[in-house]
Amino acid sequence: MDFLWELWLQHRGKIIGGILGLLIGIVIIVFGFFKALFVIICTILGYYIGKSTDNKEKFRDFLDKILPPGNR
């Protein structure tokens, strides 16, 4: 078990990247490229909304980060 923990600590990014690449590849094969792209975009957007909620940021601040400033 210690060997696996050391492996995780030394190669965490590679392991996570490999798993994410595998999952994205499976999603593209199952749904097709554009549907998979939509799912990935929704996942990333959900992550950022959840992250901003965890950091107690206001939703308007989040929108200001991702949308260009306009006439208000």
Image: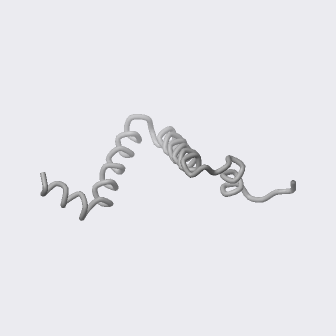
- In the visual, does 21 lie left or right of 32? left
Which residue is at 29% across, 59% downward? 12
Which residue is at 39% across, 45% downward? 24
Q: Position of residue 38 (x, y in %)?
A: 53, 41
- Residue found at the far top of this picture: 30
Q: Position of residue 21 (x, y in %)?
A: 35, 51
Q: Position of residue 48 (x, y in %)?
A: 55, 49
- Residue found at the far right of this picture: 72
Which residue is at 41% across, 41% downward? 28
Which residue is at 34% across, 55% downward? 17
- Residue found at the far bottom of this picture: 10
Front-most of residues 39 and 31: 39
**Colouring:** one colour
Front-most of residues 30 and 10: 10
Front-most of residues 1 and 25: 1
- Residue found at the far front of this picture: 56
Quarter placement of the C terminus? bottom right
The number of numbered discs placed on residues in the rendered structure image is 0
- In the visual, does 21 lie left or right of 34? left
- In the visual, does 54 lie left or right of 22? right
